[in-house]
Image: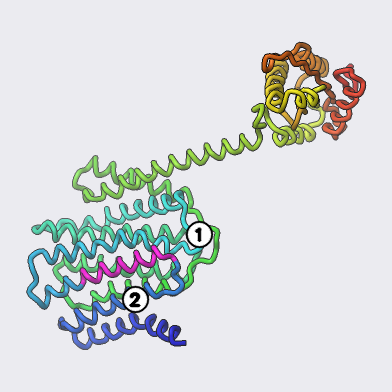
Amino acid sequence: MGSVGSNRTLRVLAPGLLILHILVRILLPDPNIVVDLYLYDAISFACILTVLRAPLLTDRISKISLALAIGSWTLGSTLSACQQFYQMPTGTTTAANALYLMLYPLAFVGIPRALMTREPLGSVELLDAAILGLGLGSLGTAFLMRPALPHFAGNFSETFFAILFPVADLILLALTLSFALTARRSLRSFFIVLGVSVFSASDLIFLWLRVNNHYAFGSITDDGWLIGLVLLAQAMWHRGSEEEKKISLHPLSIALSVLLSATLLSATSLRPGYLPGFIVIPTIATLILAFIRMTIALRQARAIGEERILARTDELTGLPNRRRFISELNALDQSPGIESALLLLDLDGFKPINDKHGHEVGDLLLKEVSRRFTKAIPHGSLLARLGGDEFGVILHGDPHSMFETALAIRATLSYPFTIAHEQISVGVSIGYVGNDGGGDLLKRADNAMYHAKREGIGVWSEPQPV
């Protein structure tokens, strides 16, 4: 009970301190070291503890990454606030901005893993979400940031960070939305998206206030960042998606993201200075990821194709296997009247050869037999190994020529094979059935083949060709 009670206290600590901070801010609008340094940072530290103690966030990497992200931002906030109340060394502003900036790569690691609770995202899903996120981030950067650029001048470092943070926020928000779309809806994903949205909006509001010289340290707008962090921390106390199946992004959205990135890159090249130059980085990154995504997709398609071929190919002879043959035969059964025929072939005397010379010689003999059969059948026919020393052939053409093909197949085994320096002879019995619409082609051909074997006549046709 004590552990449960402490967890509940910890969960409400950050929201409670935030409400207290907002109330005190309203009552005491002027900057105050207790309110703007100690209480402000206490809220973000409480967010770190909230993430680390979240019992439903089981992904260790996500938990550590998000805690470090908030911690880095908190240290930057501490340095920034200290400059308002103490004499700080030169370079403190740059150090604070660098710590603020560390939030983004850590969040890029932690947020996707927090969203996918049951099954981690595969490489394709990660690339799809990154392409969509970077593409939308580039678009937002190009048009939301452009009006602010003419208002920045002077200190390069200050201008660089002032622009970089909203750009990073737009990309983080777009990526978060993209990853959230690939996961099932849950309270965790809702609060994560809401938290990142509020945090990003706070940076954009800060930029707008800075551009118009309206920003003042200690104003109520500074609480926007805390609200975003509290929402993000609280999200980890909610269950994520319990569905194991992921939702794929629509290919059209990926294509649109790539098209937008290519368009922005072209616009930057054709009209230098019209769009901010720094959008080149996310647009190029989008196109590179799209190229990698296409390469992976092609490899997967090739692998799937090879797997399908292997699943329908006999490993020993390289001929189509029984599965492929039955599939073709079913199609033939559904097309009565088409001039075609089914042949079932069974080797004569193969078992004694296999027993005498061994399986290696037997396998070599089956390969050689397959080569001779292949040369005897006309183009467009299907020769398959059905298993052991049994083969099947589907022929097309007039009955007379098809029956002659059956005789030609038998004739290919009229002279011996030279295998392992020995002369080995083998025969074949063939059952021939025309596609006359009578059905049961396989059973009828099997009966015809056994009749040919019993009678020793080589080829038995049912019915006899005219």
Residue at (27% x, 55% y) in the render: 141
Q: Position of residue 82 (x, y in %)?
A: 14, 75
Q: Nearer the viewer, residue 310 or 359?
A: 359
**Residue 392 visible to the viewer:** no
Magenta residues (range) = 59-77
- The residue under label 1 is 119
Residue 317 quadrant:
top right
Work out whether residue 10 can be spotted: yes
* On screen, residue 155 above or below 450: below
Q: Give the Cα distance between marks 1 and 2.
A: 26 Å
**Horizontal and vertical percent position of residue 431:** 84, 24
Residue 410 in the figure: left or right of residue 419: right
Q: Is residue 6 above or below residue 267?
A: below
Q: Which residue is mark 2?
A: 49
Residue that sits furthest to the front in the current view: 356
What secondary structure is found at the residue carrying circle 2?
A: helix
At 19% from the left edge and 61% from the top edge, which residue is drawn? 162
SS at mark 1 in the image = loop
